[in-house]
């Protein structure tokens, strides 16, 4: 399974796909990136005349790269074209350090802590192009192949 | 490990994941994790992992499937502790 196969298996699409590419992946860790376009839907309202990426969207980006892409890779032996993974976010704890503005590129790095009984728990962080820490936390979810 | 020792330990492990707190107050051997306590599948995994840490045992898929209520959890823990 290559990096593009993983992105093709993601169950998201515009305007809620927050993965542009995967830079590195292994059984233990993933690194991927996304650039927030200036016309993303949420900038119109968050905030009025002052577009800043919402924390929930940063968390979503971190979950899509750090948990879902990694989870698909970990289940690669059981997946094929006819079997899309079912996923659910179950918990997250996140701290935010810096704002992300329109047209900023962010990189997400996620380290697997536990993957057992279909539950994946990761330590995830997001950095900006200056390599400054934007957000850091723990995200957990369930991932399984439908029977 | 007998019931009197095990049930309080299990209660401590289960408490953070319980959705039906009324049912948790009346927890007994027959309390079902899903039906009575309304614990979801993601949290059942957390309980399994916490049980492993607390008792220093390793649980497998079939243990997860069999661990439906307090009674079966105690049986599985005791079997593993004896091995």
Image (cartoon, rainbow, N blue to C red):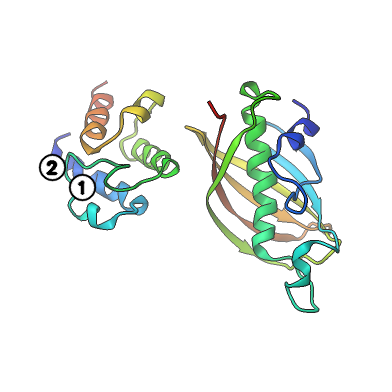
The chain that hosts pointer 2 is B
Which numbered tag is attached to residue A106? none
Q: CA distance from mark 1 to mark 2?
A: 7 Å
Dots 1, 2 in contact, CB < 8 A = yes
Closer to the camera, A97 or A79?
Answer: A79
Q: Is A31 above or below relative to B23?
A: above
Which numbered tag is attached to residue B4? 2
SS at circle 2: helix
Q: Quadrant of residue A36?
A: bottom right
Q: Quadrant of residue A47?
A: bottom right
Specify few, some or many for label 2: CA neighbours under 10 Å numbering under 14, 14-19, or 20 or more: few
Closer to the camera, B74 or A86?
Answer: A86
Q: Residue B83, how many percent across, how many down?
A: 27, 20
Left or right of residue A122: residue A97: right
The chain that hosts pointer 1 is B
Question: Disc 1 designates what residue?
Answer: B8
Q: Residue A126, how many percent across, how many down?
A: 71, 54
Q: Quadrant of the N terminus of chain A?
A: top right
Q: Residue at x 20, y 47 (%)?
A: B8
Q: Residue at x 22, y 29 (%)?
A: B75
Q: Quadrant of residue B49?
A: top left
Closer to the camera, A54 or B77?
Answer: A54
């Amino acid at each position: 399974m290559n990096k593009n196969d993983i992105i093709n298996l993601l169950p998201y699409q515009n305007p809620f796909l927050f993965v542009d590419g995967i830079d590195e992946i292994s059984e233990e860790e993933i690194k991927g990136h996304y650039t927030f376009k200036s016309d993303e839907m949420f900038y119109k309202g968050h905030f009025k005349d002052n577009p800043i990426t919402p924390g929930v969207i940063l968390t979503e980006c971190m979950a899509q790269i750090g948990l879902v892409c990694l989870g698909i890779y970990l289940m690669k032996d059981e997946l094929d074209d006819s079997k899309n993974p079912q996923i659910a976010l179950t918990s997250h704890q996140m701290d935010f350090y810096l704002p992300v503005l329109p047209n900023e590129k962010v990189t997400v790095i996620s380290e697997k802590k536990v993957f057992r009984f279909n539950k994946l728990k990761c330590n995830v962080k997001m950095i900006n192009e200056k390599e400054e820490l934007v957000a850091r936390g723990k995200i957990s979810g369930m991932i399984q192949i439908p029977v | 490990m007998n019931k009197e020792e095990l049930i309080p330990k299990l209660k401590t492990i289960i408490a953070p994941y319980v959705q039906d707190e009324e049912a948790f107050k009346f927890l007994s051997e027959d309390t079902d994790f899903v039906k009575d306590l309304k614990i979801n599948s993601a949290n059942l995994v957390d309980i399994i992992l916490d049980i492993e840490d607390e008792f220093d045992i390793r649980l497998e898929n079939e243990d997860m499937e069999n661990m439906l209520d307090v009674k079966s959890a105690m049986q599985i823990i005791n079997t593993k502790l004896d091995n």
